[in-house]
């Protein structure tokens, strides 16, 4: 990808995509995409948490919900969209962090407008990068556990249902700890990111700023608190997975 606005690759000129190129290489455009992808990911979190709250209702209801999701014709398309959103958000997080570092070292760029908002103390961009990285680590383990069924110490065949597999992941000491830390960092990330997205989209007139900041913190507490509650309470109230389903370090189960 070309790095300046005037220097465009031939395919950009050929397909008349200068507007897209401008969006991707300008810092305003990057912030805009960061904001849009962030808000769409927030939408995913609302849906994901709502579905997972069925773990409190019962195994049957949770399994029916999982079955329903798995039978959706457009599921692969939605998953692809989600992956694109994650990757775009991640890519821009790295790019804007590099820009910020370079600008700070030359000492001609300060981001005073967004300093110290949400539940995080100062230098929000660095905090966003750190909290986002922790959330990424958690999501990777989470996908290995539940989406790709790749944990060598889980016997997925014996677990058999989505409910049993999810409870097994929430009860496993390693996953439990990482999920808990991940959801707390998710809360920090959202407490600044939710409001920051509105600002990046140009939707934060000064008089609405306190409202947006309060909404951002409330959203973060609701989402992170909701997910963390599953980690804390579900293993205690759910039917425990059968001992044969979980491998012990002495006798690892072959998958
Ligand atoms: C801590 C409580 C959580 C529980 C119990 C939970 C449960 C699940 C389950 C059961 C699946 C598998 C869906 C399937 O069968 O394909 C899944 C997938 C997924 N989860 Fe979670 N989740 C939790 C938190 C989170 C959080 C906080 C995030 C994001 C920050 C997240 C992101 C994802 C993603 C991206 C997928 C893959 C979606 C797909 O490809 O269909 N989860 N989760």
Image (tube, helix red, strand yellow):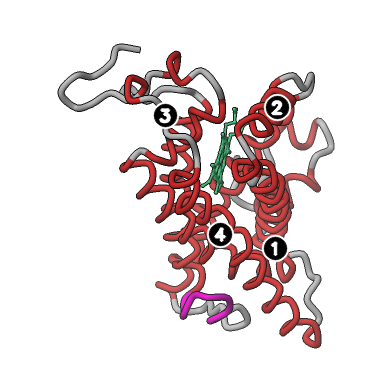
Q: In this figure, which residue is indicated by the disc labeled 2?
A: 64
Q: Residues within 10 Å of mark 2 (few under 14, many from 20)?
A: some
Q: Residues within 10 Å of mark 4 (few under 14, many from 20)?
A: many
Q: Nearer the viewer, residue 170 or 206?
A: 170
For the N terminus, the image quarter is top right
State which tag comes first along the sequence, 1 or 4: 1
State which tag comes first along the sequence, 4 or 3: 4
Foreground disc of the pair 2, 4: 2
Distance from disc 1 to disc 4, alpha carbons, whole Å, reads 29 Å
Task: Find the magenta span and give its range.
Answer: 116-123
Q: Nearer the viewer, residue 176 or 23?
A: 176
Do callouts 3 and 2 mark residues in contact (Cβ within 8 Å)? no
Foreground disc of the pair 2, 1: 2
Q: Residues within 10 Å of mark 3 (few under 14, many from 20)?
A: some
State which tag comes first along the sequence, 3 or 1: 1
Foreground disc of the pair 1, 4: 4
Picture quadrant where residue 57 is located: top right
Left or right of 40? Residue 230 is: left
Q: Is residue 36 visible?
A: yes
Residue 224 disc label? 4
Q: Give the secondary structure at mark 4.
A: helix
Foreground disc of the pair 4, 3: 3
Q: Is residue 6 visible?
A: no
Distance from disc 2 to disc 4, alpha carbons, whole Å, reads 25 Å
Question: Where is 155 relative to 24, above or below?
Answer: above
Kindly tell me whether mark 1's CB lies below 8 Å from ligand 1.
Answer: no
State which tag comes first along the sequence, 2 or 4: 2
State which tag comes first along the sequence, 2 or 1: 1
């Amino acid at each position: 990808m070309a790095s300046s606005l005037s220097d465009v690759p031939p395919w950009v000129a050929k397909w008349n995509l200068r507007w897209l190129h401008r969006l991707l290489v300008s810092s305003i455009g990057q912030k805009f995409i960061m904001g849009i992808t962030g808000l769409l990911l927030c939408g995913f979190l609302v849906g994901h948490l709502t579905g997972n709250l069925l773990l409190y209702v019962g195994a049957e209801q949770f399994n029916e919900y999982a079955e329903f999701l798995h039978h959706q014709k457009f599921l692969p398309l939605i998953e692809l969209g989600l992956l694109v959103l994650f990757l775009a958000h991640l890519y821009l997080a790295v790019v804007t962090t590099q820009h910020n570092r370079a600008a700070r070292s030359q000492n001609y760029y300060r981001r005073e407008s967004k300093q110290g908002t949400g539940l995080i103390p100062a230098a929000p961009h660095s905090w966003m990068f750190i909290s986002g990285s922790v959330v990424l680590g958690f999501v990777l383990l989470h996908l290995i556990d539940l989406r790709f069924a790749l944990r060598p110490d889980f016997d997925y065949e014996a677990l058999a249902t989505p409910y049993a597999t999810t409870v097994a992941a929430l009860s496993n000491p390693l996953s439990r700890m990482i999920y808990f830390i991940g959801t707390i960092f998710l809360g920090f990330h959202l407490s600044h990111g939710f409001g920051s997205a509105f600002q990046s989209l140009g939707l934060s007139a000064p008089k609405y700023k306190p409202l947006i900041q309060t909404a951002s913190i409330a959203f973060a507490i609701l989402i992170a608190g909701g997910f963390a509650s599953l980690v804390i309470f579900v293993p205690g109230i759910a039917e425990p997975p059968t001992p044969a389903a979980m491998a012990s370090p002495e006798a690892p189960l072959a998958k």
